Image (spheres, rainbow, N blue to C red):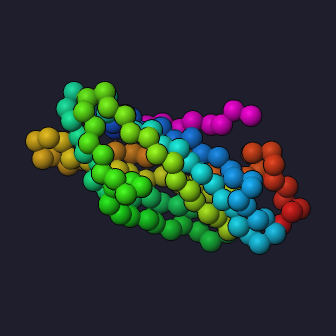
Amino acid sequence: MRLPLYHAVTHGVRVTVRPRYLVEQSRPAERHFMFAYSVRIENVSPVTVQLLTRHWFIYDSAVGESEVQGDGVVGEQPVLAPGGVFEYQSFCPLRSPQGTMHGTYRFRRDDGAEFDTTIPRFDLDADAAGTFRQEDV
């Protein structure tokens, strides 16, 4: 099965996300659904940028929306020269088999100007993975 890709380009920064359902780490009978998502951040602008912060909006169909904010990503605040790429993987537990995530990254250019880039909205869907059955809950 081919995993979906979601991407957005804002202010010369391309963000691509590929989510997947982690069957082996999920326990549907206990309402624990684990998802992983891989993120690729590419600087397609002509200037160097540094990722400063993240701001995520996470929607879980069982509990509603929550927010996560913090410095950097996976403990780093990468500096990306023109053409530079940074990739990481992270995880998101949900109480239901469906949800979404989206948000922003705050960057700073060499000249000190700060700007937000879009993290595209992406689906977290255990049903679409073909390995989850609603009757397992």
Quadrant of res 73: bottom left
Q: Residue at x 69, y 32 (%)?
A: 2
Residue 69 relative to residue 36: left or right: left
Q: Residue at x 62, y 71 (%)?
A: 63
State the residue lying farthest toward the right. Answer: 135
Residue 43 relative to residue 15: left or right: left
Residue 100 coordinates in the image, percent (x, y): 58, 54
Residue 129 coordinates in the image, percent (x, y): 75, 45
Residue 129 relative to residue 5: left or right: right
In the rendered image, is residue 106 in sight?
no
Using the image as rendered, state which of residue 27 and residue 16 is in the foreground.
27
Residue 44 coordinates in the image, percent (x, y): 31, 28
Can residue 93 be found in the magenta stretch?
no
Using the image as rendered, state which of residue 34 and residue 96 is in the foreground.
34
Residue 120 coordinates in the image, percent (x, y): 47, 44
Using the image as rendered, state which of residue 86 and residue 114 is in the foreground.
86
Vertical side of 3 occupied by 68: above or below: below
Q: Residue at x 57, y 36 (%)?
A: 5
Q: Residue at x 48, y 52 (%)?
A: 102
Vertical side of 99 occupied by 1: above or below: above
Quadrant of res 65: bottom right
- Image quadrant holding the C terminus, namely bottom right
In the rendered image, is residue 14 in sight?
yes
State the residue lying farthest toward the left. Answer: 111
- Image quadrant holding the N terminus, namely top right
Quadrant of res 46: top left
Vertical side of 101 occupied by 11: above or below: above
Q: Start and end of the magenta stretch? A: 1-9
